[in-house]
Image (cartoon, coloured by chain):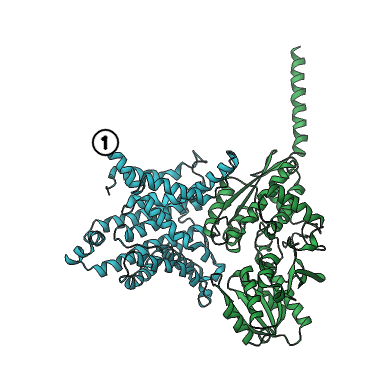
């Protein structure tokens, strides 16, 4: 996958940081709701990046990253609710807890390859919401009732509202995490991770400690997704087991495949895609029914599915891969 | 001439000013979501995901507003009903409700479904001062006007219903030893908490065994066996339809014959009593507040006839035995009435004021004798139920309409 040109990166960053400041000029374009929606996209992008580190760069398939997302969200929620920990301190805590959980889960997972690993993680995703409801944990997790939280308050009397602050909070976190991921992938360890993905046996022969790399990658991947979960707990200001059903894990996977497996930019595109398409699928569905007056009662999920099929047919390598190929073809002709 | 024109203009502008002030007095008042032409109502529910069986409520409400619009709307305004899918995920509910309030700018949110989903948005709605009206959940926490003046429930809450069963047991069963089957979620807990409260201080002695199950369990067979072994002579069945039916059948299979109480949630003849076997279900007691479409005794009922005509016209192809449509119709009627009473003052504050000023309002499809009453301190629209026991192939109401003010 091609590297993202550096000058474009700066342009994107300037736009991302400057955009909310246009609120007084274009109040409709930069509404609080839009900012909130983009914040959820950022959170999704971080979660997809977590999965990408594992699947895209290390070749281990997970159908259960929703579980780590839930663990991260609950770690943050419990810390804020029971121990009055400030919201920003919950991110490292969630990262550590999820790293440990992911690392431990990675140990037995070493014995599982490919589809078997996918099934094991799938089981994890199914189990976590049930575990959160378990009666011994109920005092901590609030059981099915969940935990109601406060939204992050704007610090230092900055002239921002809650949604603007939340947006910057998520954005800065994302930039830091992507920078870290980029550095890691371009280091010795990153090349080892990818070597394991590309040819396990060759990597082993070259002296890479495959077992350790696989488990640590599992832990890092879980930590990334856990941080996304902790951010979401702050953004939504509520956690409950029903928020972390199996569809969440599937959505991360969709974001990964659609954005581009094994691409950092693809993770961002994937995160944006699943929030955007999930929402617009509903709008399209009501548009077809009410405005076009067609007699199909297409559910939003049908539209979502159709869009996915079309996209995968046109861009089998995900959006980033597809756009790259398109550019190359244009340049050649 | 010149002066004349000047006086003329002066006179006209004075008149305009005056008429301006007079119209200002009678002026229509609007908040976001209301105009001369339309009223925007927001809604979200699970059209997909694990609880999508409840999605039909949203479809039913949509059909109701279609009927209202065909009849000319509310005080000349058409209802623009915007309904979105939240897949029963509270995180998604927050997203879609923010869309409804901030992008679509609805006047209010109506009958948003699910206890976790409504918990997730309650604080937001009250901060934004947007009515969160007649929510579709029976939890007991929706009637707290002091803390949450913008949130109101609709149906009798589970807690109250639990108290009523307990009181009935205390009055009618000697040396009651109760075995409880409970779904392990907020629905189950609310019932059991109310039930314990109703039994009074000695509840620990009277409850022989409390067995729980998860919604994902395949059966509740082992729980029923445990309950039988506990020696209970009363069975309180706090389960959703599928499990309630299994429990009744299993109890009969292992010839456990306690006095049985079952929650209103599972009172459907078609989806519970019939699969459980009519022979096994004789004498079961439950509470009701709505008329059941599968019951023959309502066949000639005027409300039921109107409802069936509406179903045929606006919900073609829908299952007329599904009690969720009864719920949708009755709760929409109450919303309709609330907006009608608002007149031309369609502000959010006035909507809440009207919602909190019903005096014994008759709502179609509620059982005879049950009415809607609210006040500035009473945010529980329906608080009465009537007990009924199962005889032959149908429910038979008995006793008085009971109201319990437990909360």
**Residue A37 position (above or below residue B203):** above
Per the image, the residue denoted by label 1 is A331
* Residue sitting nearer the eye, B307 or A32: B307
Task: Report helix, strand or loop for mark 1.
Answer: helix
State the residue at coordinates (74%, 32%).
Answer: B20
**Residue B162 position (above or below residue A231):** below
Residue A296: horizontal and vertical position, in percent? 57, 45
Residue A71 lies in quadrant: bottom left
Horizontal side of residue A295 vs A258, given as left or right = right
Split into 4 quadrants, where in the image is the N terminus of chain B?
A: top right
Horizontal side of residue A241 vs A309, given as left or right = right
User: How dense is the environment of label 1, judged by Cα within 10 Å: few (below 14), some, or many (20 and up)?
Assistant: few
Shade of chain A as shown in the rendered figure: cyan
State the residue at coordinates (54%, 67%).
Answer: A146
Can residue A270 be spotted in the picture?
Answer: yes
* Residue sitting nearer the eye, B223 or A287: B223
Residue B383 lies in quadrant: bottom right
Residue A11: horizontal and vertical position, in percent? 34, 42
Shade of chain B as shown in the rendered figure: green
Residue B77: horizontal and vertical position, in percent? 71, 41
* Residue sitting nearer the eye, A11 or A202: A202
């Amino acid at each position: 996958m091609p590297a993202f040109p550096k000058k474009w990166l700066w342009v994107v960053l300037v736009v991302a940081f400057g955009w909310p400041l246009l609120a007084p000029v274009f109040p409709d374009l930069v509404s609080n709701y839009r900012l909130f929606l983009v914040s959820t996209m950022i959170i999704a992008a971080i979660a997809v990046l977590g999965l990408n580190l594992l699947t895209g760069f290390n070749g281990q398939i997970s159908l259960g990253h929703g579980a780590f997302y839930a663990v991260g969200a609950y770690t943050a929620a419990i810390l804020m609710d029971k121990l009055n920990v400030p919201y920003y301190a919950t991110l490292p805590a969630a990262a550590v807890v999820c790293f440990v959980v992911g690392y431990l889960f990675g140990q037995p997972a070493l014995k599982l390859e490919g589809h078997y690993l996918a099934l094991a993680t799938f089981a994890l995703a199914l189990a976590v919401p049930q575990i959160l409801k378990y009666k011994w944990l109920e005092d901590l997790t609030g059981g099915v009732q969940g935990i109601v939280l406060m939204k992050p308050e704007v610090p230092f009397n900055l002239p921002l509202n809650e949604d603007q602050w939340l947006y910057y909070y998520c954005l800065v976190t994302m930039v830091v995490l992507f920078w870290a991921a980029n550095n890691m992938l371009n280091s010795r360890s990153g090349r080892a991770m990818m070597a394991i993905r590309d040819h396990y046996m060759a990597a082993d022969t070259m002296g890479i400690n495959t077992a350790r790399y696989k488990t640590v990658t599992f832990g890092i991947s879980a930590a990334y997704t856990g941080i996304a979960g902790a951010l979401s707990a702050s953004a939504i200001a509520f956690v409950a087991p029903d928020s972390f059903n199996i569809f969440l894990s599937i959505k991360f996977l969709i974001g990964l495949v659609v954005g581009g497996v094994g691409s950092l930019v693809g993770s961002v595109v994937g995160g944006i895609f699943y929030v955007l398409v999930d929402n617009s699928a509903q709008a399209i569905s009501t548009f077809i029914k009410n405005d076009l007056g067609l007699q199909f009662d297409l559910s939003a999920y049908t539209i979502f599915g159709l869009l996915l099929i079309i996209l995968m047919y046109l861009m089998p390598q995900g959006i980033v891969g597809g756009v790259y190929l398109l550019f190359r073809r244009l340049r050649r002709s | 001439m010149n002066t004349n024109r000047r006086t003329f203009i002066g006179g006209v502008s004075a008149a305009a000013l005056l008429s301006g002030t007079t119209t200002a007095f009678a002026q229509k008042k609007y908040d976001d979501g209301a105009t001369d032409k339309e009223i925007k109502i927001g809604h979200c529910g699970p059209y997909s995901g694990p609880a999508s069986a409840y999605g039909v409520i949203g479809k039913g409400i949509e059909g109701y507003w279609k009927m209202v619009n065909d009849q000319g709307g509310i005080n000349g305004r058409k209802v623009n009903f915007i309904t979105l899918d939240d897949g029963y995920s509270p995180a998604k509910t927050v997203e879609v409700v923010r869309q409804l309030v901030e992008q679509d700018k609805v006047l209010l949110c109506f009958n948003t479904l699910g206890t976790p989903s409504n918990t997730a948005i309650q604080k937001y709605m009250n901060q934004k001062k947007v009515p969160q009206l007649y929510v579709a959940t029976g939890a007991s926490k929706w009637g707290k006007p002091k803390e949450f003046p913008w949130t109101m429930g609709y149906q009798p809450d589970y807690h109250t219903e639990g108290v009523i069963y307990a009181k009935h047991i205390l009055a009618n069963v000697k040396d009651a030893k109760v075995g409880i089957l409970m779904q392990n979620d907020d629905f189950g807990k609310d019932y059991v908490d109310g039930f314990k409260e109703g039994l009074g201080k000695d509840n620990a002695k009277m409850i022989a065994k409390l067995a729980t199950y998860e919604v994902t369990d395949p059966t509740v067979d082992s729980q029923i066996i445990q309950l039988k072994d506990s020696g209970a002579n009363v069975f309180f069945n706090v389960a959703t339809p599928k499990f309630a039916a299994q429990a009744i059948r299993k109890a009969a299979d292992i010839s456990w014959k306690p006095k049985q109480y079952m929650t209103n949630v599972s009172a459907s003849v078609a989806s519970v009593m019939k699969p459980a076997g009519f022979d096994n279900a004789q004498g079961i007691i439950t509470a009701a507040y709505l008329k059941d479409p599968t019951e023959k005794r309502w066949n000639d009922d005027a409300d039921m006839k109107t409802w069936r005509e509406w179903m045929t016209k606006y919900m073609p192809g829908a299952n007329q035995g599904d009690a969720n449509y009864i719920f949708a119709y009755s709760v929409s009627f109450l919303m309709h009435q609330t907006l009608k009473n608002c007149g031309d003052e369609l502000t959010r504050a006035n909507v809440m004021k009207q919602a909190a000023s019903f005096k014994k309002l008759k709502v179609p499809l509620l059982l005879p004798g049950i009415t809607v009453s609210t006040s500035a301190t009473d945010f529980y629209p329906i608080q009465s139920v009537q007990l009924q026991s199962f005889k032959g192939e149908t429910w038979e109401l008995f006793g008085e309409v009971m109201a319990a003010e437990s909360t």
